Image: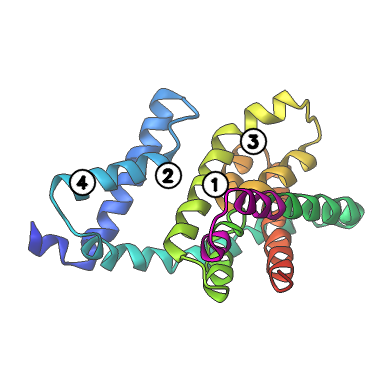
Amino acid sequence: MAELASSPLFGIALSIAAFSAGIWLQKKTGLTVCNPLLIAIVLVIGVLLLFKIPYESYNEGGSMINLFLSPATACLAVSIHSRAELLRKNWLPILAGAAAGSATSMGSVYVLCRLLGLEEDMTWSLLPKSVTTPIAVGISEGHGGIVPITVVAVILTGIMGSLTAPALIRLFGTKDPMEAGLAIGACSHAVGTSRAIEMGEIQGAMSGLAIGICGLMTVAVSLFL
């Protein structure tokens, strides 16, 4: 098992198998809580613990999957382009909504970190939790944050957004698909956007757009903190 785990293919195969199992389980149960990414994380951790495989061995292949993260995020531009006319007509509300989401996310984290007395490095690790991973990691690294904590915070934020978005949209009576998509993308980045795409084409396009706008705004604001 040790020889198998030392191969980069092991991390890739395990990640794909775990995520496929998560997709199958979600389709089988129909439960929102059975998020494929959440299931995959649990399964991968379980396999590593069961067979006493070091994380470093798994990450030989797992890190290769990360290379596709940025291109996958960029692919969201396809759905955005399909709604170009909608963007031209509503550019001001879109910018205002994304700015409000970005400011709320960073502001709430900053205030809570100050109230709880967290150190500066922990604060910077958590501040970019609501933007996509490549941007969040760049912000965290650039300000002395702890990258693994940043990655975990981003993943958990995305999963929570994906799980709770439909219920929260119903709770607040949001009828406009553009508003719903912007809210999901601004709060829970790419993981939430995958859920928004399932909800509708407009929701998916607006959520993907919010990822880019909020990412740029978060980078800009972080320069002055």
The residue singled out by tag 1 in the image is 158
Question: How many angstroms separate mark 2 from mark 4 (CA)?
Answer: 15 Å
In front of the other: label 3 or label 2?
2
Tell me where the magenta segment starts and ends, as one range. Answer: 106-125
| Mark 2 residue crowding within 10 angstroms, few (<14) / some (14–19) / many (20+) | many
Give amino acid for label 1: Gly
Give amino acid for label 4: Val
Question: As rendered, which of 58 and 84 lies closer to the eye?
Answer: 58
Query: Where is residue 79 shown, x and y percent of the image?
Result: 68, 54
Question: How many angstroms separate mark 3 from mark 1 (CA)?
Answer: 16 Å
Q: Is 91 a magenta residue?
A: no
Total of numbered circles in the picture? 4
Query: Which comes before the other along the chain, label 3 or label 1?
Result: 1
- Residue contact between numbered discs 1 and 2, judged by CB atoms under 8 Å: yes
Question: How many angstroms separate mark 1 from mark 2 (CA)?
Answer: 10 Å
The residue singled out by tag 3 in the image is 199
Query: Which comes before the other along the chain, label 4 or label 1?
Result: 4
Instruction: Please identify the dominant SS of the magenta region.
Output: helix
Query: Which comes before the other along the chain, label 2 or label 4?
Result: 2
In front of the other: label 3 or label 1?
1
The residue singled out by tag 2 in the image is 37
Judged from the image, the secondary structure of the residue bearing numbered disc 1 is: helix
Give amino acid for label 3: Met
| Mark 1 residue crowding within 10 angstroms, few (<14) / some (14–19) / many (20+) | many
Please report the residue visible at 15 percent of the width from the left and 61 percent of the height from the top: 5
